[in-house]
Amino acid sequence: MNTDKELRTRLQRIHRKSYPAYKDLKGSYRFPGYILHINHVQGDPFAAPSKLSVELAQSQAGFPEDLFDKKYKRISLQDHLIRIFGKELSNCSFHAGGSGKSGLMSISRCGQEVLERTALVMDKDRVLARFEVGFPANGRSINAPELEKILFRYIPECVKKALCYKSLDPKRIRSVVNLAEDQYFIRQELAKRNLVAFVANGSVLPRESGVSDKPMKNAVAFESPASLKTDLSLPHRGKLAGMGIPRGITLIVGGGYHGKSTLLKALERGVYDHIAGDGREYVITDRTAMKIRAEDGRAVSHTNISAFINHLPNGKDTVDFSTEDASGSTSQAANVVEAVDSGAKALLIDEDTSATNFMVRDELMQSVISADMEPITPFIDQARTLYEKMGISTVLVAGSSGAYFSIADHILQMDTYRAYDITDKVRKICGIRAAGQTNPGSAGTGQASAANNIWSQEGRCLRVGRLERRHDQIKLKQFGRESFSIGRETVDLKYVEQIVDTEQTTTLSYIMRYVAEQLEKNPKPEIGRLLSEVCRYMEDHGPGVPGKQAGQPGNLAYVRPQEIYACVNRYRGFRRK
Ligand code: ADP
Ligand code: MG
């Protein structure tokens, strides 16, 4: 391997040459304490910055193994180090100057959620951090002394301050890992106690504004109703009380503006862990919970939506249903069946974003329009089956219709941001007996065998046409968090609301490309099998796609199976095999 001296020599050699001469720097160099990899060099000073990584042996980095000996600890530690390293890089960013992106230094920007990312990975042998640097230029000619400053002064300083355990505050690091351990503990408790979610007393659920994910200041802190109060004893924090939302069907009712959607939003995000100070650190939801909403105009490809839609007027098949432009109800039906297919054990629904005709049909309407004229079996008629036969719970915000009272196991009322359990009161008023009280049959074991085949997406063999390529690779282009294009098709993820980070969208675009490549090759391209392979890969190896371990890009973040299914199912280019 080359040494840092060799790098210095090369730098001197290319000073003032035209920008592409920077490509000569590609390679790995041994610095005191770490290896610097220059993986990709940008084509000009205005292009996307160059990709670098530093690799430290644990003998240099020195992180005690008990800080990362469990996956959940490792992920939170990695996340924390990205934040610290990012702060150090940003302190030096643009200190070296020049045209375009000259002097930029950055790494993945983390939000309120803790996500596994390729930007920084740690194991017992090493720490690897992937980041970006804008190689400096004057106009289009190389400014080597400025890059020398970055590579020989700024980066070593950042590495020392952020990636070496002995320069970090050990108490702070420990508290990050302890929080992860407490959060993991709560997740385990959900399963043991048959809960969909836990919302700790004192949690701050509302956000600062519609565009900020930071906690609202002076918000009313969450407080559990006595009947649902759940006492936990966390390994580090100790005693913590909060509301346990039991499995089954839970209704959240209340007047407008009383905090219903805010509670549901917090539950949606609770599939991820949050950083200390977020206000939702102890809001923990079943990892597989999926937000379900109407999404007019979404594409549906060869999906069995017969659980909800049947005998359409145009005679269209709903066991193998496709459309380029779904209606409110068909899109929401597709969203439910694809969540079920992805293994979701809880559905989160807000009437604000639902299609009314998908949710309910009132009695008057039923008496006017006979059942055989109505293609839609509303969700209310399937919700109990979903729970009892398949163990899939529902948490539903419903402010305007009492229809769901009769099938709910628990009814919460939000009143000026406080939660009350009004289950008994509602039953008394409406003369309803307890709805469920049934346990999920075989569902407790996660077996969907009792479900009949209206829910099955098995044997779905799809093919993709030939996709546009560049340098032998299918073309991808990303548009922020909300969408990406592959070949000529755009995959719209705007309403897949539990995607919280642009790097998740990047990962999904890579997965979509992998899926398309596999389908092109495979004579019997069963999509279900392919997706479970991709999901398994991500659980075992972190963000990425099978077969691409070496040269992993540094801008990928973890996505759940739920988002993978949602993404692939929104691709418009599928044809039936
Ligand atoms: P609903 O769905 O019941 O109509 P929302 O959840 O949309 O109500 O909340 C209405 C408003 O109240 C939002 O602006 C939200 O930020 C604010 N809000 C929600 N919860 C709280 C709280 N605990 N403390 C203070 N403000 C809150
Ligand atoms: Mg609302």
Image (cartoon, rainbow, N blue to C red):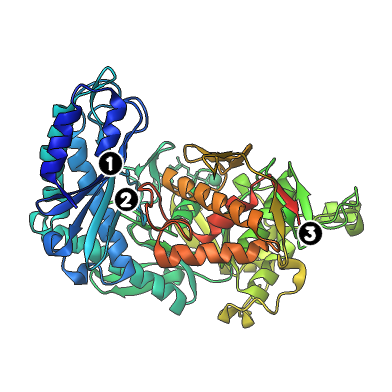
Instruction: Please identify, in this view, whether the residue under mark 2 or under mark 1 is nearer the observer.
Output: 1
Q: Nearer the viewer, residue 157 or 173?
A: 157
Task: Out of 220 and 297, give the one closest to the viewer.
Answer: 297
Q: CA distance from mark 2 to mark 1?
A: 19 Å
Image position, residue 119 (x, y; %) = 32, 50
Label 3: which residue? Answer: 377
Within 10 angstroms of label 1, few (less than 14), some, or many (20 or more) residues? some
What type is the residue that disc 3 sits on? Thr
Residue tagged 1: 26
Q: Earlier in the sequence, mark 2 or mark 1?
A: 1
Neighbor class of circle 3 (other Cα within 10 Å; few <14, some 14-19, many 20+) is many
Q: In the image, what residue occupies the spot 30% across and 68% down? A: 182
Tell me which image quadrant ligand 1 sits in.
top left
Residue 411 at x, y percent in the picture: 56, 63
Q: Secondary structure at mark 3?
A: loop
Taking the image as shown, residue 192 lies to the left or right of residue 567, namely: left
For the residues labelled 3 and 1, the Cα–Cα distance comes to 60 Å
Residue 119's disc is 2
Badge 2 residue CB within 8 Å of ligand 1: no
Position of residue 200 measured from the top left corner of the image (x, y, whole percent): 36, 63
Residue type indicated by callout 2: Ala
Can residue 250 be seen in this snapshot?
no
Nearer to us in this view, 552 or 375 = 552
Q: Nearer the viewer, mark 3 or mark 1?
A: 1
Crowd around label 2: few <14 · some 14–19 · many ≥20 (10 Å) = many
Camera sees residue 515: yes
Secondary structure, mark 2, is: loop
Q: Give amino acid for label 1.
A: Lys
**Residue 533 horizontal side relative to residue 37, left or right:** right
Instruction: Specify the quadrant of the image occupied by residue 523.
Output: bottom right
Question: What residue is shown at x 17% (from left), y 33% (from top)?
Answer: 11
Q: Where the C terminus falls, by quadrant? A: bottom right
